[in-house]
Image (cartoon, grey):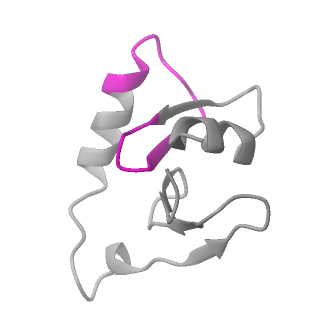
Amino acid sequence: MQYGEIWEKIIDNDEKSLVCFANGTCVVMTEPSDQLEIQAVELLKAWGPVQPGSSAGDFSAIYLDDYPGWVVTSHHPDILNLRGSG
């Protein structure tokens, strides 16, 4: 199962759009535009890079029961990464 397929199953919400990247990163678009990929990349640029010792360095892991791996959260609630799968 590919990252995008897993993300679609984890985030089951018809009102949100997902942009999934090959490295497992997923950007959840709560207010999607016509250019989802550009919107997602701009959000990643605005909320990175991570600065150690700041809230940008905070993360947590959510272990998945139904899929292999875990979700790593970031300091932005709509930027997530899937690890241990793909």
Q: Residue at x 71, y 67 (%)?
A: 64
Q: Residue at x 62, y 43 (%)?
A: 7
In this picture, is 2 found above or below 61? above
Viewed as shown, does residue 11 lie left or right of 3? right
Whether residue 28 is visible here, answered yes or no, is: no
Q: Give the residue at the far top of this rendering.
A: 34
User: Residue 54's image quarter?
Assistant: bottom left
Viewed as shown, does residue 12 lie left or right of 17? right
Q: Residue at x 33, y 78 (%)?
A: 57
Q: Give the residue at the far bottom of this rendering.
A: 53
Q: Measured from the top left, where is residue 71 in percent x and y?
A: 57, 64
Q: Which residues are the magenta region?
A: 20-38
Q: Measured from the top left, where is residue 6 in percent x and y?
A: 64, 44
In this picture, is 79 found above or below 6? below
For the residue pair 48 and 6, the one nearer the viewer reads as 6
Whether residue 74 is visible here, answered yes or no, is: yes
Q: Give the residue at the far front of this rendering.
A: 1
For the residue pair 16 and 25, the one nearer the viewer reads as 25
Q: Residue at x 62, y 36 (%)?
A: 5
Q: Measured from the top left, where is residue 19 in percent x and y?
A: 47, 32
For the residue pair 65 and 44, the one nearer the viewer reads as 65
For the residue pair 36 and 24, the one nearer the viewer reads as 24
Q: Which part of the image, by quadrant, shows the N terminus?
A: top right
Q: Measured from the top left, where is residue 12 in percent x and y?
A: 77, 38
Residue 5 is a magenta residue: no
Viewed as shown, does residue 15 lie left or right of 57? right
User: Residue 41's image quarter?
Assistant: top left
